[in-house]
Image (tube, helix red, strand yellow):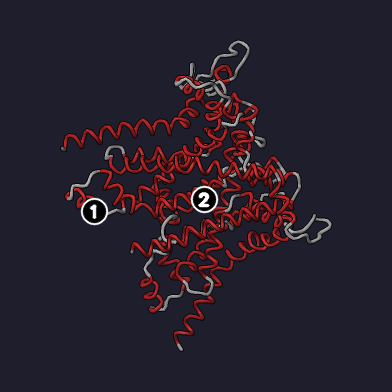
Amino acid sequence: MLGNLLKNRLWLTVLMLLLALIYLFPMVFVICNSFMSKNEVVSNYTISHSNAGGSIRLRLIPEIVSLEQYYNVFILKYDYLFYFWNSALLVVPIVAGQLIVSIFAAYAFAKLRFRFRDQLFFAYIVAMMMPFQATLVPNYIMSSNLGILGGRISVILPGIFGAFGVFLLRQFMCYIPDEYIEAALVDGANHLRILFEIALPLVRTGLAAMVILLVIDNWNMVEQPLIFLDNFKEFPLSIVLSDINNTEKGIVFAASVIYMVPMLLIFLYGEKYIVEGIQLSGLKA
Amino acid sequence: MRLKRFHLREWHIAIMFLSPSLLGFLLFYIVPFLQSIWYSMIDNVLNKKFIGLANYAALLTSSSFLTGCGNTLRFTAIFIPVNLTLSFLIASALNKTRYCADMLRMSFIAPLVIPVASVVAFWSLFFDSRGVLNQITGYIGWETADWLNSDKAIYCVVLLYIWKNTGYSMVMFLAGLQNIPAQYYEAADIEGANAWDRFRHITAVYLSPTTFFIIIISIINSFKIFREIYLLAGSYPNRSIYTIQHYMNNMFHSLDYQKLTSASFLTVLVIYMFVVILYSVERKVGRYIS
């Protein structure tokens, strides 16, 4: 019985390992191919007259390991670092702003009693679930009302007031026992002190999860900058990458890796928080 | 009397704490949303004549809008059952394996975290008419197809979306599985229940709230597939993957704000409905279980 069980589990693990390899393959493929020379990429993956009718074979191992793609992306052509900075200029203010705004709002939704609290929170949830195209019009109208259309601020401001941060932090704060807060109130602490000295230390995981999930989400941003930004010199990496994807196959893999790496690091370092954040976004309405 | 003062103060504090968030929320979501409802009921931006629901009537007869709706529905109908089954199987397998469980879990979550734009280079080679997918389907004897430029494109998007989202549903299922008390299974074993009985009477019952949540969230997320399709197939993809979001995007670029705002209001309505269902059922189930 025990031996059978062990064999079963081993079989299962092997199967899962194979499946996991399939899931990881696109990433591995892109990373491996980023070390090929431009010519090798082009001759491998574009159909020319010489191999018309043939089929594309995906290659993992470069014939000669080369940093030519990286050299092109960083220095020769695209000023990649410059666009990297553009992405940061959008992501950092959005995440920092949303963090500050959400801390207070989440505490109010989780631990304070007031009229229409649940209805208001529900409106936040609905806003959070909207696809970008549905909030595009409202955001666009308001940006043009405020006269900020075209600049970075027109992407940043709606981003700061996204409802996700409030939602996630509130889920975490709901787990703080009310007794802690009542006890602190009896001791004469006000809610501001309770928030910073009791609530926030208790939801450190939640803060980390929120920051990580927000960074990932905003790093991926494609639609908002495309529509709101006038100047292509302010475009983030995500858009520049899809441009390279369409126009210059020879260096696309290195460009992709550079775009992927920050998220990969965040993932390796913060996987625990990502999992917890996802799990808590589903419990306790 | 003292209690009353206490509540009053709490209400004041709540307003103070909420005001920054609420101000932005009103400014960027609620007010312009109301404004866009108004836009959806006028004839055009210059004339501003109130025409009631005429824009909605026009929308519901517009063939490209209906195509978009149909495709979003079709996508959901294929994506959800496959994704649900696959992620449940992976989650229960991971729940059982002791070896490399962390590493395996991370492999399935990675696609969720890695930006799609950075692996599009792979997927476009994969779906290319001379690409890997055709070589695989060739082995089992299917005809070669130009996947992205035919009505089969929807399957490509489903595949990509499954690859990306298995991790999310898997994490949810894992949490659900770990919350089932082990004694239940032990008791079932003592009573001689087989695997199917255990699944039907314990696992399925306890996972039903989770499953329900995943289904609704997946439906809501199906309204967000625009980015993946855009990166894979550009602004004008094959008809089979032309979604409501493409429609809205194109209306935006052709400055047809009336159609755009009516379409976005309908979207908001549909999503609102799903969120209401989600939360009312979840509340009932929560009460039932506790």
Marks 2 & 1, CB-CB < 8 Å contact:
no
Q: Which mark is residue B184?
A: 1
Q: Are marks 2 and 1 on the same chain?
A: no
The answer to whether any part of residue A49 appears in the image is yes
Return the residue found at the far bottom.
Answer: B1
User: Residue flagged by tag 1: what amino acid is it?
Assistant: Tyr
Q: Please report the residue visible at 42 percent of the width from the left and 31 percent of the height from the top.
A: A22
Residue B16 x %, y %: 55, 72
Q: CA distance from mark 2 to mark 1?
A: 39 Å
Q: Please report the residue visible at 60 percent of the width from the left and 29 percent of the height from the top.
A: B150
User: Residue flagged by tag 2: what amino acid is it?
Assistant: Leu
Q: Residues within 10 Å of mark 2 (few under 14, many from 20)?
A: many
Say which element carries label 2. Answer: helix
Residue A252, compared with residue A129, is above or below; it is above
Say which element carries label 1. Answer: helix
The answer to whether any part of residue A97 appears in the image is no
Q: Is residue B97 toward the left or the right of residue A89 in the image? A: left
Of the 4 image quadrants, the one containing the N terminus of chain A is top left
Of the 4 image quadrants, the one containing the C terminus of chain A is bottom left
- From the viewer's perspective, is the residue at label 2 or at label 1 nearer? 1
Q: Which mark is residue B17?
A: none
**Among the 4 quarters of the image, the one containing residue A11:** top left
In the foreground, A234 or B140:
B140
Q: Which mark is residue A214?
A: 2
Q: Residues within 10 Å of mark 1 (few under 14, many from 20)?
A: some
- Please report, as a chain letter, where disc 2 is located: A
**Among the 4 quarters of the image, the one containing residue B120:** top right
Residue B79, compared with residue A282, is above or below; it is above
